[in-house]
Image (cartoon, grey):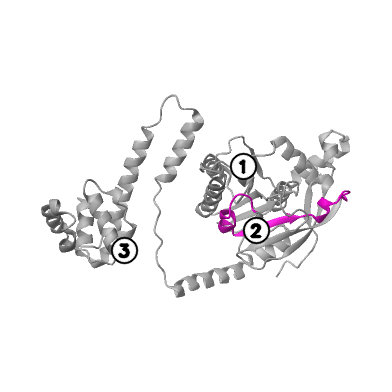
Amino acid sequence: MIEQNVLACFLMSDKSRSYIPRTKPEWFNGWHRQLVKTMQDMYLSNEPIGLHTLYKHFKEYAKEMAQLTNHFVTDVHIEKELLFLEFDYNKRKLLSELSKIEPEWTLKDIQTHLETINLNSRIVMRNEIKSMSSVVGQKINELENRIKTGNLMKGLKTGWLTLDKYIGGWNKGNLVVVGGRPGMGKSALGLNFCVDGSPYAKFLFVSIEMSEDELAERVIADYSNIENYKIRNAKLNNQDLEYVSNELFKQNEFHVIDTKDNNVYNILSLLKIHRAKYGLDVVVIDYLQKLDAGGKDVRQNVSNASTALKNFAREMGITVIALAQLNRDGKNARPELTELKESGQIEADADVVLFPFRPAYYQDVKPDIEDAVVIISKNRHGKCVDIPVTFTGSQTRYRENVEIPNQF
Protein backbone atom coordinates (compact mmCIF):
# COMPACT_ATOMS: atom_id res chain seq x y z
CA MET A 1 0.00 0.00 0.00
CA ILE A 2 2.79 2.45 0.92
CA GLU A 3 4.60 1.67 -2.33
CA GLN A 4 1.50 2.58 -4.35
CA ASN A 5 1.01 5.77 -2.28
CA VAL A 6 4.57 6.93 -3.03
CA LEU A 7 4.22 6.27 -6.76
CA ALA A 8 0.88 8.09 -6.79
CA CYS A 9 2.54 11.10 -5.17
CA PHE A 10 5.28 11.06 -7.82
CA LEU A 11 2.59 11.05 -10.53
CA MET A 12 0.29 13.68 -9.01
CA SER A 13 2.34 16.01 -6.77
CA ASP A 14 4.97 18.54 -7.87
CA LYS A 15 6.33 18.69 -4.31
CA SER A 16 6.80 14.91 -4.13
CA ARG A 17 8.75 14.77 -7.40
CA SER A 18 11.66 16.58 -5.71
CA TYR A 19 12.27 13.29 -3.84
CA ILE A 20 12.65 11.25 -7.04
CA PRO A 21 16.46 11.68 -7.47
CA ARG A 22 17.25 10.26 -4.02
CA THR A 23 14.74 7.39 -4.27
CA LYS A 24 16.28 4.01 -5.12
CA PRO A 25 14.41 1.78 -7.61
CA GLU A 26 15.39 -1.35 -5.65
CA TRP A 27 13.12 -0.26 -2.79
CA PHE A 28 10.18 -1.19 -5.06
CA ASN A 29 8.83 -4.46 -6.41
CA GLY A 30 8.22 -5.77 -9.92
CA TRP A 31 7.68 -3.29 -12.74
CA HIS A 32 7.54 -0.44 -10.22
CA ARG A 33 11.35 -0.52 -10.14
CA GLN A 34 11.59 0.31 -13.83
CA LEU A 35 8.87 2.95 -13.39
CA VAL A 36 10.94 4.75 -10.73
CA LYS A 37 14.10 4.44 -12.86
CA THR A 38 12.28 5.98 -15.85
CA MET A 39 10.92 8.78 -13.64
CA GLN A 40 14.47 9.52 -12.47
CA ASP A 41 15.76 9.71 -16.05
CA MET A 42 12.90 12.04 -17.02
CA TYR A 43 13.40 14.22 -13.93
CA LEU A 44 17.12 14.67 -14.64
CA SER A 45 16.32 15.43 -18.30
CA ASN A 46 13.77 18.01 -17.17
CA GLU A 47 10.92 16.16 -18.90
CA PRO A 48 7.40 16.45 -17.48
CA ILE A 49 6.33 13.43 -15.41
CA GLY A 50 2.74 12.25 -15.67
CA LEU A 51 0.51 9.54 -17.06
CA HIS A 52 0.62 11.03 -20.57
CA THR A 53 4.45 11.11 -20.72
CA LEU A 54 4.98 7.71 -19.07
CA TYR A 55 2.41 5.92 -21.20
CA LYS A 56 4.79 5.42 -24.16
CA HIS A 57 7.27 3.63 -21.89
CA PHE A 58 4.72 1.40 -20.13
CA LYS A 59 1.94 0.65 -22.60
CA GLU A 60 1.51 -2.84 -21.19
CA TYR A 61 0.89 -1.33 -17.71
CA ALA A 62 -1.39 1.53 -18.78
CA LYS A 63 -4.31 0.26 -16.69
CA GLU A 64 -2.14 -0.30 -13.60
CA MET A 65 -0.64 3.21 -13.88
CA ALA A 66 -4.09 4.76 -14.11
CA GLN A 67 -5.12 2.82 -11.00
CA LEU A 68 -2.09 4.18 -9.12
CA THR A 69 -3.54 7.68 -9.26
CA ASN A 70 -6.53 6.46 -7.24
CA HIS A 71 -4.17 5.99 -4.28
CA PHE A 72 -3.31 9.68 -4.13
CA VAL A 73 -4.83 11.48 -1.14
CA THR A 74 -2.07 13.71 0.27
CA ASP A 75 1.69 14.20 -0.09
CA VAL A 76 2.16 15.27 3.56
CA HIS A 77 3.70 11.94 4.59
CA ILE A 78 5.85 11.32 1.50
CA GLU A 79 9.18 11.58 3.36
CA LYS A 80 8.10 9.17 6.11
CA GLU A 81 6.74 6.72 3.53
CA LEU A 82 10.03 6.77 1.60
CA LEU A 83 11.92 6.15 4.85
CA PHE A 84 9.66 3.16 5.56
CA LEU A 85 10.41 1.71 2.09
CA GLU A 86 14.15 2.14 2.70
CA PHE A 87 13.93 0.45 6.11
CA ASP A 88 11.91 -2.43 4.68
CA TYR A 89 14.33 -2.93 1.78
CA ASN A 90 17.40 -2.88 4.05
CA LYS A 91 15.76 -5.36 6.41
CA ARG A 92 15.06 -7.80 3.55
CA LYS A 93 18.56 -7.34 2.17
CA LEU A 94 20.16 -7.92 5.59
CA LEU A 95 18.18 -11.13 6.13
CA SER A 96 19.15 -12.32 2.66
CA GLU A 97 22.85 -11.67 3.31
CA LEU A 98 22.67 -13.44 6.68
CA SER A 99 21.34 -16.54 4.96
CA LYS A 100 24.51 -16.70 2.83
CA ILE A 101 26.73 -17.51 5.84
CA GLU A 102 28.04 -21.08 5.55
CA PRO A 103 29.03 -23.35 8.49
CA GLU A 104 32.52 -23.89 7.00
CA TRP A 105 33.34 -20.17 7.06
CA THR A 106 36.03 -19.08 9.52
CA LEU A 107 35.08 -16.88 12.46
CA LYS A 108 36.99 -13.97 10.89
CA ASP A 109 35.10 -14.40 7.58
CA ILE A 110 31.77 -14.38 9.42
CA GLN A 111 32.71 -11.29 11.45
CA THR A 112 33.83 -9.43 8.32
CA HIS A 113 30.63 -10.41 6.49
CA LEU A 114 28.45 -9.29 9.42
CA GLU A 115 30.25 -5.95 9.67
CA THR A 116 29.94 -5.39 5.92
CA ILE A 117 26.21 -6.09 5.78
CA ASN A 118 25.70 -3.96 8.89
CA LEU A 119 27.41 -1.00 7.22
CA ASN A 120 25.50 -1.55 3.96
CA SER A 121 22.15 -1.69 5.75
CA ARG A 122 22.48 1.61 7.57
CA ILE A 123 20.01 4.37 6.89
CA VAL A 124 21.55 7.72 5.99
CA MET A 125 19.44 10.30 7.76
CA ARG A 126 18.82 13.51 5.83
CA ASN A 127 19.77 16.64 7.67
CA GLU A 128 17.26 19.40 8.12
CA ILE A 129 17.90 22.47 5.97
CA LYS A 130 18.38 25.50 8.23
CA SER A 131 18.62 29.22 7.66
CA MET A 132 22.11 30.69 8.06
CA SER A 133 20.81 33.08 10.72
CA SER A 134 19.69 30.15 12.91
CA VAL A 135 23.07 28.40 12.46
CA VAL A 136 24.93 31.60 13.40
CA GLY A 137 22.61 32.06 16.37
CA GLN A 138 23.47 28.57 17.66
CA LYS A 139 27.18 29.34 17.29
CA ILE A 140 26.82 32.63 19.22
CA ASN A 141 25.03 30.80 22.04
CA GLU A 142 27.83 28.22 22.11
CA LEU A 143 30.50 30.96 22.26
CA GLU A 144 28.66 32.77 25.07
CA ASN A 145 28.46 29.54 27.07
CA ARG A 146 32.19 28.83 26.58
CA ILE A 147 33.08 32.36 27.72
CA LYS A 148 30.85 32.05 30.80
CA THR A 149 32.26 28.66 31.80
CA GLY A 150 35.87 29.55 30.98
CA ASN A 151 36.19 26.69 28.47
CA LEU A 152 37.54 28.94 25.75
CA MET A 153 38.96 26.20 23.54
CA LYS A 154 36.49 24.24 21.43
CA GLY A 155 38.38 20.94 21.44
CA LEU A 156 40.00 18.85 24.18
CA LYS A 157 43.43 19.90 25.41
CA THR A 158 46.28 18.09 23.67
CA GLY A 159 48.88 18.73 26.37
CA TRP A 160 50.79 20.81 23.80
CA LEU A 161 50.11 24.55 24.09
CA THR A 162 51.13 25.25 20.51
CA LEU A 163 48.82 22.56 19.10
CA ASP A 164 45.98 23.90 21.23
CA LYS A 165 46.61 27.37 19.82
CA TYR A 166 46.71 26.46 16.14
CA ILE A 167 44.29 23.53 15.80
CA GLY A 168 42.05 24.27 18.79
CA GLY A 169 42.74 20.98 20.57
CA TRP A 170 41.42 17.56 19.59
CA ASN A 171 38.09 18.31 17.90
CA LYS A 172 35.10 15.97 17.69
CA GLY A 173 34.60 14.37 14.30
CA ASN A 174 38.11 15.20 13.10
CA LEU A 175 40.56 12.93 11.31
CA VAL A 176 44.13 13.94 12.16
CA VAL A 177 46.86 12.34 10.05
CA VAL A 178 50.42 12.11 11.37
CA GLY A 179 52.67 11.31 8.42
CA GLY A 180 56.32 10.38 8.58
CA ARG A 181 59.02 8.68 6.58
CA PRO A 182 60.35 5.39 8.00
CA GLY A 183 62.39 6.04 11.13
CA MET A 184 61.14 9.61 11.59
CA GLY A 185 59.20 8.71 14.74
CA LYS A 186 55.52 8.90 13.78
CA SER A 187 54.67 6.06 16.20
CA ALA A 188 56.61 7.83 18.93
CA LEU A 189 54.67 11.05 18.31
CA GLY A 190 51.34 9.20 18.36
CA LEU A 191 52.23 7.60 21.69
CA ASN A 192 53.46 10.96 23.04
CA PHE A 193 50.05 12.44 22.23
CA CYS A 194 48.43 9.70 24.34
CA VAL A 195 50.76 10.33 27.28
CA ASP A 196 50.48 14.12 27.14
CA GLY A 197 46.75 14.20 26.43
CA SER A 198 45.57 11.51 28.86
CA PRO A 199 45.01 13.97 31.76
CA TYR A 200 42.43 15.79 29.61
CA ALA A 201 40.76 13.08 27.49
CA LYS A 202 40.14 9.33 27.23
CA PHE A 203 42.71 7.89 24.83
CA LEU A 204 43.12 4.55 23.09
CA PHE A 205 46.22 3.50 21.13
CA VAL A 206 45.60 0.82 18.46
CA SER A 207 48.86 -0.85 17.44
CA ILE A 208 49.05 -3.04 14.37
CA GLU A 209 52.81 -2.68 14.16
CA MET A 210 54.26 -2.72 17.71
CA SER A 211 53.54 -5.24 20.46
CA GLU A 212 52.11 -4.17 23.82
CA ASP A 213 55.49 -5.10 25.34
CA GLU A 214 57.26 -2.57 23.11
CA LEU A 215 54.60 0.02 23.90
CA ALA A 216 55.11 -0.55 27.63
CA GLU A 217 58.87 0.02 27.30
CA ARG A 218 58.30 3.29 25.47
CA VAL A 219 55.73 4.53 27.99
CA ILE A 220 58.06 3.71 30.92
CA ALA A 221 60.88 5.64 29.19
CA ASP A 222 58.51 8.53 28.50
CA TYR A 223 57.24 8.86 32.07
CA SER A 224 60.54 8.18 33.83
CA ASN A 225 63.19 9.77 31.54
CA ILE A 226 65.15 6.50 31.72
CA GLU A 227 66.92 5.45 28.52
CA ASN A 228 65.24 2.78 26.38
CA TYR A 229 68.24 0.43 26.45
CA LYS A 230 68.19 0.27 30.27
CA ILE A 231 64.54 -0.78 30.21
CA ARG A 232 65.03 -3.34 27.40
CA ASN A 233 68.05 -4.88 29.15
CA ALA A 234 66.61 -4.63 32.70
CA LYS A 235 69.50 -2.42 33.81
CA LEU A 236 67.46 -0.68 36.48
CA ASN A 237 68.03 -0.65 40.21
CA ASN A 238 65.34 -0.75 42.89
CA GLN A 239 65.35 3.03 43.12
CA ASP A 240 64.64 3.27 39.37
CA LEU A 241 61.81 0.73 39.59
CA GLU A 242 60.24 2.53 42.56
CA TYR A 243 60.48 5.84 40.71
CA VAL A 244 58.86 4.37 37.58
CA SER A 245 56.00 2.85 39.60
CA ASN A 246 55.35 6.09 41.45
CA GLU A 247 55.41 8.18 38.26
CA LEU A 248 53.09 5.83 36.39
CA PHE A 249 50.51 5.82 39.18
CA LYS A 250 50.50 9.63 39.18
CA GLN A 251 49.44 9.77 35.54
CA ASN A 252 45.99 9.49 34.01
CA GLU A 253 45.27 6.13 32.43
CA PHE A 254 44.89 5.39 28.73
CA HIS A 255 44.25 2.09 26.94
CA VAL A 256 46.11 0.12 24.28
CA ILE A 257 45.11 -2.59 21.82
CA ASP A 258 47.84 -4.78 20.29
CA THR A 259 45.99 -6.49 17.44
CA LYS A 260 46.96 -8.80 14.59
CA ASP A 261 43.54 -8.30 12.96
CA ASN A 262 44.06 -5.37 10.60
CA ASN A 263 40.54 -5.35 9.13
CA VAL A 264 39.42 -1.75 9.58
CA TYR A 265 35.75 -2.66 10.07
CA ASN A 266 36.58 -5.21 12.78
CA ILE A 267 38.75 -2.60 14.52
CA LEU A 268 35.97 -0.01 14.37
CA SER A 269 33.54 -2.54 15.89
CA LEU A 270 36.03 -3.13 18.70
CA LEU A 271 36.32 0.62 19.26
CA LYS A 272 32.53 0.91 19.61
CA ILE A 273 32.55 -1.77 22.31
CA HIS A 274 35.47 -0.07 24.08
CA ARG A 275 33.70 3.31 23.93
CA ALA A 276 30.55 1.82 25.47
CA LYS A 277 32.56 0.27 28.33
CA TYR A 278 35.15 2.93 29.12
CA GLY A 279 34.34 6.04 27.09
CA LEU A 280 36.53 7.31 24.26
CA ASP A 281 37.57 10.78 23.12
CA VAL A 282 40.66 10.17 20.99
CA VAL A 283 41.94 7.04 19.24
CA VAL A 284 45.42 6.73 17.71
CA ILE A 285 45.80 4.08 14.97
CA ASP A 286 49.29 2.87 14.01
CA TYR A 287 49.21 2.83 11.05
CA LEU A 288 46.90 3.65 8.11
CA GLN A 289 48.57 1.75 5.25
CA LYS A 290 48.48 -1.49 7.27
CA LEU A 291 44.69 -1.48 7.51
CA ASP A 292 42.67 -3.88 5.36
CA ALA A 293 39.58 -2.13 3.96
CA GLY A 294 38.70 -4.54 1.14
CA GLY A 295 40.10 -2.45 -1.71
CA LYS A 296 40.85 -4.01 -5.11
CA ASP A 297 44.39 -2.61 -4.99
CA VAL A 298 46.64 -0.85 -2.48
CA ARG A 299 45.51 2.64 -3.45
CA GLN A 300 41.82 1.78 -3.24
CA ASN A 301 42.38 -0.03 0.05
CA VAL A 302 44.03 3.01 1.64
CA SER A 303 41.30 5.30 0.27
CA ASN A 304 38.59 3.07 1.76
CA ALA A 305 40.37 2.92 5.13
CA SER A 306 40.88 6.70 5.25
CA THR A 307 37.22 7.40 4.47
CA ALA A 308 36.05 4.77 6.99
CA LEU A 309 38.10 6.42 9.75
CA LYS A 310 36.79 9.89 8.88
CA ASN A 311 33.17 8.66 8.84
CA PHE A 312 33.73 6.85 12.14
CA ALA A 313 35.12 10.02 13.77
CA ARG A 314 32.03 11.97 12.71
CA GLU A 315 29.59 9.21 13.67
CA MET A 316 31.07 8.68 17.13
CA GLY A 317 31.93 12.34 17.84
CA ILE A 318 35.57 11.56 18.62
CA THR A 319 39.00 12.44 17.21
CA VAL A 320 40.79 9.79 15.15
CA ILE A 321 44.57 10.22 14.83
CA ALA A 322 45.81 8.00 12.00
CA LEU A 323 49.54 7.51 11.58
CA ALA A 324 50.58 7.24 7.94
CA GLN A 325 53.68 6.26 6.00
CA LEU A 326 55.27 8.73 3.61
CA ASN A 327 57.10 7.82 0.44
CA ARG A 328 60.85 7.44 0.79
CA ASP A 329 61.43 10.07 -1.90
CA GLY A 330 62.83 13.49 -1.02
CA LYS A 331 65.33 12.45 1.64
CA ASN A 332 66.68 15.29 3.74
CA ALA A 333 63.82 17.51 2.51
CA ARG A 334 60.73 18.78 4.30
CA PRO A 335 57.82 16.37 3.83
CA GLU A 336 54.88 17.52 1.72
CA LEU A 337 51.24 16.51 1.41
CA THR A 338 51.89 14.90 -1.98
CA GLU A 339 54.16 12.35 -0.26
CA LEU A 340 51.33 10.67 1.67
CA LYS A 341 51.80 7.12 0.48
CA GLU A 342 49.36 5.38 -1.86
CA SER A 343 46.44 7.81 -1.80
CA GLY A 344 45.41 11.43 -2.26
CA GLN A 345 42.21 10.46 -0.43
CA ILE A 346 44.11 10.71 2.88
CA GLU A 347 44.76 14.39 2.27
CA ALA A 348 41.13 14.94 1.23
CA ASP A 349 39.68 13.22 4.33
CA ALA A 350 42.07 14.73 6.88
CA ASP A 351 41.12 17.83 8.84
CA VAL A 352 44.69 18.21 10.12
CA VAL A 353 47.94 16.79 8.76
CA LEU A 354 51.07 16.79 10.95
CA PHE A 355 54.59 15.86 9.82
CA PRO A 356 57.35 15.21 12.39
CA PHE A 357 60.63 16.24 10.75
CA ARG A 358 64.13 15.72 12.18
CA PRO A 359 66.89 17.11 9.93
CA ALA A 360 69.53 15.48 12.16
CA TYR A 361 68.11 12.04 11.29
CA TYR A 362 70.04 12.20 8.02
CA GLN A 363 73.37 13.02 9.67
CA ASP A 364 76.01 10.30 10.08
CA VAL A 365 76.37 11.13 13.77
CA LYS A 366 73.09 12.01 15.47
CA PRO A 367 72.92 13.91 18.77
CA ASP A 368 70.78 12.28 21.45
CA ILE A 369 68.67 15.43 21.75
CA GLU A 370 67.76 16.81 18.33
CA ASP A 371 66.18 20.10 17.32
CA ALA A 372 63.18 19.18 15.20
CA VAL A 373 59.76 20.44 14.13
CA VAL A 374 56.24 19.14 13.86
CA ILE A 375 54.90 20.67 10.67
CA ILE A 376 51.20 21.53 10.52
CA SER A 377 50.85 20.98 6.77
CA LYS A 378 47.04 21.07 6.59
CA ASN A 379 44.76 22.76 9.07
CA ARG A 380 41.03 23.30 8.59
CA HIS A 381 40.99 25.25 11.85
CA GLY A 382 43.66 27.86 11.20
CA LYS A 383 47.24 28.53 10.18
CA CYS A 384 49.80 26.05 8.92
CA VAL A 385 52.97 26.57 10.97
CA ASP A 386 56.04 24.73 12.28
CA ILE A 387 56.00 23.74 15.95
CA PRO A 388 59.57 23.70 17.35
CA VAL A 389 60.21 20.49 19.30
CA THR A 390 63.05 18.40 20.64
CA PHE A 391 63.43 14.70 19.95
CA THR A 392 65.28 12.60 22.52
CA GLY A 393 66.48 9.45 20.77
CA SER A 394 67.36 7.51 23.93
CA GLN A 395 63.74 7.85 25.10
CA THR A 396 62.04 7.98 21.66
CA ARG A 397 60.31 11.15 22.85
CA TYR A 398 59.03 14.35 21.22
CA ARG A 399 58.53 17.44 23.39
CA GLU A 400 57.46 20.90 22.36
CA ASN A 401 60.01 23.48 23.44
CA VAL A 402 58.12 26.73 22.97
CA GLU A 403 55.89 27.92 25.78
CA ILE A 404 53.02 30.27 25.06
CA PRO A 405 50.44 31.76 27.42
CA ASN A 406 47.42 29.65 28.31
CA GLN A 407 45.11 32.40 27.08
CA PHE A 408 45.56 32.98 23.36
The label on residue 44 is 3
Q: Which residues are magenta?
A: 340-368
Mark 1–mark 3 Cα distance, whole angstroms, equals 42 Å
Residue at 82%, 37% in the rendered image: 231
**Res 143 quadrant in image:** bottom right
Q: Earlier in the sequence, mark 2 or mark 3?
A: 3
Where in the figure is residue 132, as x and y percent of width and height? 45, 73
The question of residue 281 being in magenta is answered with: no
In terms of secondary structure, where does tag 3 sit? helix
Observer-nearest residue: 15 or 220?
15
Where in the figure is residue 370, as x and y percent of width and height? 84, 54
Q: Amino acid at mark 2?
A: Leu
Q: In the drawing, does residue 345 fall left or right of residue 63?
A: right
Name the residue tied to disc 1: 290
Mark 2–mark 3 Cα distance, whole angstroms, equals 38 Å
Task: Tell me: residue 287, above or below residue 174.
Answer: above
In terms of secondary structure, where does tag 1 sit? helix
Q: Amino acid at mark 1?
A: Lys
The label on residue 337 is 2
Q: Amino acid at mark 3?
A: Leu
- Quarter occupied by the C terminus: bottom right
